[in-house]
Amino acid sequence: MLIANIHNAKSNLSSLIASVLAGKDVIIAKAGKPIIKLIRYIPEKKQRISGLFKGQTWISDDFTDEDPEIEKMFSLK
């Protein structure tokens, strides 16, 4: 476990973060008393719901049809 005072933590924040990412406990102290523990942030995984917007969207039948004018702009001929 690493213990750093606030002044030291300000100066060496990058190395303290690297220590946390390596799995070490890091405690920041004020006047020798521990006040904060740095921990790695692990985001919550949200459950995805299949078909949540079923029936609420619409795509036209010609959605994938190509526009001749736009096709001419990208043509290399």
Image (cartoon, rainbow, N blue to C red):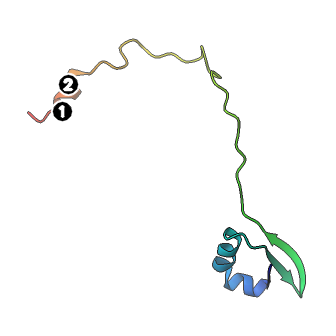
Disc 1 marks which residue?
73
Q: Residue at x 73, y 82 (%)?
A: 9
Q: Residue furthest top?
A: 61
- The answer to whether marks 2 and 1 mark residues whose Cβ atoms lie closer than 8 Å is yes
Instruction: Residue 6 in the image: state x and y as whole percent.
Output: 79, 83
Describe residue 63's horizontal placement relative to residue 24 as left or right.
Answer: left
Q: Identify the disc placed on residue 69.
A: 2
Task: State which quadrant residue 25 falls in.
Answer: bottom right
Count neighbours of disc 2 (C-alpha within 10 A) and say few if under 14, some if 14 to 19, many if 20 or more: few
Q: How many marks?
A: 2
Q: Is residue 21 above or below residue 46?
A: below
Disc 2, SS = helix
| Badge 2 amino acid | Glu
Q: Residue at x 70, y 43 (%)?
A: 45
Quadrant where the N terminus lies?
bottom right
Describe residue 25's horizontal placement relative to residue 35 as left or right.
Answer: left
Instruction: Residue 5 in the image: state x and y as whole percent.
Output: 80, 85
Describe residue 41's horizontal placement relative to residue 30 as left or right.
Answer: left
